[in-house]
Image: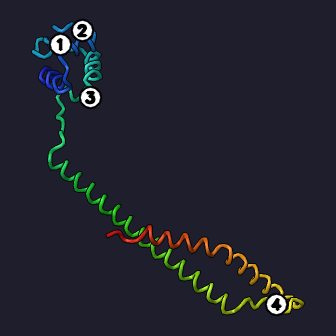
Amino acid sequence: MLNETIKAIRKSKGLSQEELAIKLNVVRQTISKWEQGLSVPDSDMLISISEALETSVSTLLGETVIESKVDDLKAISEKLEIINLQLAQRKTTRRKIFHWLFISSCVVIVIISAVLITLNSPYLAWNYSDPETAVFGAASHAFEWLFVRLAPIILIGAIVGIFLTRKKV
């Protein structure tokens, strides 16, 4: 059993008896005797053989090795396909969310701009001697000042975002 296992694993690794013997610091005839079942390696040598053949000692001693079957590969392939589909769906959903977010940003900017144009900066006519009116007027002025400077940049970015996230045909 051990002799057949050593031979099978050695061949599967593409090693000759001579190459394995060099790795183990033994003569080729020793490997030949092990594989013919004429002698058995000691425990220290079994460890060395397992390291040289990159396998476990229990495998060398006859523990059955479960090889991946075509069905196992098929199952893994199907799982990977499902994961890829889920990732593609998530990407599509994320793209749609950003697309509608950019559209919403454009609509909000246009609505706020229309409101500001319609109101024609009413805070300029307010009585700033009244503390409540002064604070609200200053806040309105700050909002309009900031909006007028940032809205064009945000609007251009949102329009570019709409084109970049549109559904490609």
**Disc with the residue nearer the chain's start (4 vs 3):** 3
Q: Residue at (15%, 50%) from the top-left corner?
A: 71
Q: Which label sits in the foreground, 2 or 4?
A: 4
Badge 4 marks a residue whose secondary structure is helix
Q: Identify the residue position indicated by label 1 in the image.
A: 31
Q: Give the Cα separation between the discs numbered 4 and 3.
A: 84 Å
Tell me residue 77's x, y (percent). Answer: 22, 52
Q: Identify the residue position indicated by label 4 in the image.
A: 133
Q: Give the Cα separation between the discs numbered 1 and 2.
A: 8 Å
Q: Which label sits in the foreground, 3 or 2?
A: 2
Kindly identify the amino acid type of the residue bearing the numbered disc 1.
Ile
**Disc with the residue nearer the chain's start (3 vs 2):** 2
Kindly identify the amino acid type of the residue bearing the numbered disc 2.
Val
Badge 1 marks a residue whose secondary structure is helix
Badge 3 marks a residue whose secondary structure is loop
Q: Identify the residue position indicated by label 3 in the image.
A: 56
The image's mark for residue 26 is 2
**Disc with the residue nearer the chain's start (1 vs 2):** 2
- Above or below 79: residue 57: above
Dividing the picture into quarters, in which one does residue 20 lie?
top left
Q: Residue at (32%, 63%) from the top-left corner?
A: 86
